[in-house]
Structures are given as C-alpha cells and as structure tokens.
Amino acid sequence: MAPMTNQKDRVLIFDTTLRDGEQSPGATMTHDEKLEIAEMLDDMGVDIIEAGFPIASEGDFAAVSDIAKRSKNSVICGLARAKPGDIERAFEAVKHANLPRIHTFIGTSPQHRAIPNLDMDQMAEVIHTTVSHARNLCDNIQWSPMDATRTEDDYLCRVVEIAIKAGATTINIPDTVGYTAPAESADLIRMLLERVPGADEITFATHCHNDLGMATANALAAVDAGARQIECTINGLGERAGNTALEEVVMAIKVRNDIMPYETGIDSRQIMNLSRKVAAVSGFPVQYNKAIVGKNAFAHESGIHQDGMLKSADTFEIMRPEDIGLSETSIVMGKHSGRAALRSKLENLGFDLGDNQLKDVFVRFKELADRKKEVFDDDLIALMNVSTANPSREPMELSSLSVVCGTEGPQSADLAMRFDDEIKSVKATGDGPVDAVFNAIKSLFPHDARLQLYQVHAVTEGTDAQATVSVRLEENGKIVTGQSSDTDTVVASAKAYIAALNNLLVRRTKSAPDA
C-alpha cells in the first residue's frame, strides 16, 4: 500500500470509450454521438480523452478533429501505430485542441514481435525513430509497449528507457490481453520506476483489460505502486471482455480513500447520465448487476436488507445513490403529475431541460402515463433518450400501424408513414410481426442498408412495461443507429427502424459530393 501523505496524490483519468470502447464488436458510434459523449466527458472532468484512431478512416479522423476543436478542458489524444504516416495523421487530427496529445504504440512481447518479424534491436530502433518523430510534432507524447505484461522484464525496461529518451512524457503499460493479476501489475510498475533511468520524471499509466475479471483491481494496484494515470472506459466498454470501468476506479478511490489516498478530478454525479448515454448509443445495455451503474446496484429485495435500509442506509450501501447522479428515491409519476413535477424529477435524474425540450417531453410523458398506471424513473430516462436523439421533426415518421400475428400465418402489417407532408400507406407480410413491419417500411422507403443489430429490452417490470428497441443499419460502410421506446414492442421497433433511416439520410447528405 502506498504511504499515507498529508496531500493526496492526483490520479489522471484517461478515457478511451471513443477509441478502445468503440472497438467492441458492434459498438460503432456516429459522428454526432461521439461529439456528444466527448462533450460530456470534458464536462465531467476527464483529464485525457482518447478520441479515436485517426488513420483508421476518414470518419475517425473527422471525429477526432472536431472533438479537438470543441474541447474545453481535457487533453485530446489520437492513437497511432509506430508508423510515420499514422503519427502525422494523428497530429493533424488533434493539433487544434487546447491540449493535444499523440499516443503511439507497438507490440513488444514475443508474440507481438513475431508479427512484423522484428528482432529486439530492430524494434528498439523503430521505437526510437517513431517516438522522436512524434515529439518533433507535439510536446505531449504517450507511448505504449502493447502486451507489456507478457514482455520480458529486461526488454521492457530497455524499450521504456528508449521511449523516455526519445521524448515520451507518459509511458502506458497495457495489459492488452487481460493476462496479469494485481500483485504482478503492481510489481511491474515498481520495477520500471526502480530500474529505468528517467522514470521518475514521466507519468506511468495503466491500461487493463478484463478478460479474467481483474481490470479494476489491476489498475488500482498499479496506482498503488506509482502509476498516476488510469486508462478506462464508461461501463467498461471495450474489446472482448472490456476495459477497466471508469465508474469503478473513480468510486473505489472515493469510497475507500482511507486506504487509497488519491484524488481524481471527476464529478462523480455525472457518472450515471454518461453511463446511460454510452449504453444507448453503443447498443450495449448495462448488465443489471454491474458495479456502480447497474440497475440493481442500489436495489434491495431481501427482507433483511430492506429492514436494515429502512433503519439506516449505510447498513447495506457503501455509497450514496446521489454520488453517481441517481435520485435518492424512486418517485412514481402518473397522469396527474404536472410539468413542474416532471422538470424537478428529470433534474434529479441528471437531465437539464430547456423550456422547449420540456414541452416536447411533457407531451410524450402524458401519452405514456395514459397507457401505464405508473411511470418510473427508467421510463422517464427512456423518454429522454428518445427526445434528445430526435429533437426536431424528422423527414420520415410513423403515422399509424396495425399488425396481425399469431400461430396462423402469414403475419402482416398495415403501416402508414409521413414523408415530409405526405402520408403513404402499405400492407406487407413477413416472418413475424416485426419482420412484416420492417418489410413494409422498406417498401415505402427502398434502400440497401443491412440490418446489423435488432435489440429489445424492457425498461421496467410488468406486462405494461416500455420496450426500448435499438436498431443498427449499415450501408456502404456507413453505420447508423436508431432507438425508440414504447409500451408496444412492435411500435417501438417501427419507430427505431425509421429513426435509423432518418440518420442514414443525414449521413448520405453529409457524404454527398459538392455540386
């Protein structure tokens, strides 16, 4: 354990939701969604935002560049392989940020050295050349020996020293495959601090994957040993089993500050809102028993637990719900609730609404309250996710829908859609009601977009629960998403599909060549 000091050590939070998180299979985000999440991360106090991998695509470059131009407080970082072209492209993307950073990497373990067929000396030369090149472009350079936890100790010390001498200001030690354990994670940082010349003059970072379920423990162990930057993602999003979860390390330091005398600059009250946003745009719902942000994290069903909570909350809760942006109680709203009560409730849930937005949400709320006996917090969150995703009138909207389904086929859908100011109707059949609805929509708006994801989850319990449906479409490399909630799952499916098509129209317009 690190020695106790009078002044708490600052641990930097490096969020890579928009880069490593987006590499989760199927988690691709749109340009506007990336900008919105980056703005939320900046407002929350994230020290460094890894905004993307600029060389990967024109879309990635544009997103990183726009985030860099709009950022206020955070360092904006772009990832680059150990190649001059990658590094130059990354700098072009981040150079407009108030605080730009280039993050370059190369795999140093025996397994990764074999891929480019470089021996140790050849790789050492590549590291010196590429880190030097990056430092000539930008003063803030981060270097990572990918798969560091499976790299030989002597060689790891050698290449870290080379990177420091070449100008790296942050050395990140990645557990790329989630292989290490907490004691090893700490020992690795201690070894580098003790053996590498100049190690005390730079910042060591830790980047842990969760393949063995130890990412958070490994990250905090590295901090205990002297690392002062944690790389993480919202909801632990990331490749394979994901990354260290931002909410977990931040709240672990906050709650157990007695044994982890560190501090971060994170406003933890914004955690829940960001968690919901990332879940919505990525299409990756948060598991109910997920630490900190899971639906059950502050739920108590056992009679013993409920009795203890009624007497004193700290009997079974080690942190307050409001510390992460949750309302302290789950107040049930109904059809008799007024606009002022709705505004107050939404503010308690972390949403700040303007008058026009409140007016729109209130209409949706009343429509929902007429169909449900009780409108819970999660229902309101679902309403807000749909409202913020579609703040203005869209080119296409669902006008009416009726379906025939059951054991006697074929299943069919009678559907009407509004196209600007024109209503068009059609009847279609399909393999089930949702397939029939999608076939009807496609006949009214022909397209070649491929359905990549169709996902349904109930917002609350009960047979009258709202269903939130997420749809992801792909057309010529363009990926768009749509989401909608309704007590009728088929209606929610139709609205989500149409929302995705509206987003596809926007993408087509943006990518169309100038006349």
Image: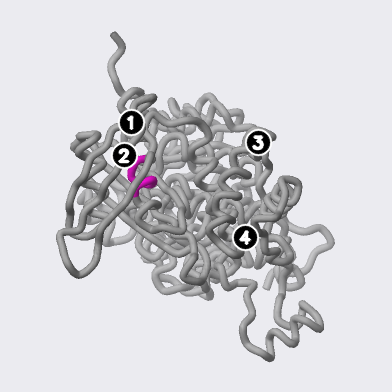
Question: Which residue position is annotated with label 2?
Answer: 416
Between the C-alphas of marks 4 and 1, the distance is 35 Å
Question: Which residue position is annotated with label 3?
Answer: 73
From this viewpoint, is residue 174 visible?
no
Between the C-alphas of marks 3 and 2, the distance is 47 Å
Q: Which residues are magenta?
A: 494-498
Q: Is residue 33 above or below residue 306?
A: above
Q: Earlier in the sequence, mark 1 or mark 2?
A: 2
Q: Earlier in the sequence, mark 3 or mark 2?
A: 3
Q: Earlier in the sequence, mark 4 or mark 1?
A: 4
Q: Nearer the viewer, mark 4 or mark 2?
A: 2
The amino acid marked with disc number 2 is Ala
Question: Which residue position is annotated with label 1?
Answer: 423
From this viewpoint, is residue 245 visible?
yes
Q: Earlier in the sequence, mark 4 or mark 2?
A: 4
Q: Nearer the viewer, mark 4 or mark 1?
A: 1
Q: Residue furthest bottom?
A: 304
- In percent of width and height, residue 512 lies at 29, 20
Q: Is residue 172 above or below residue 323?
A: above
Image quarter of the C terminus: top left
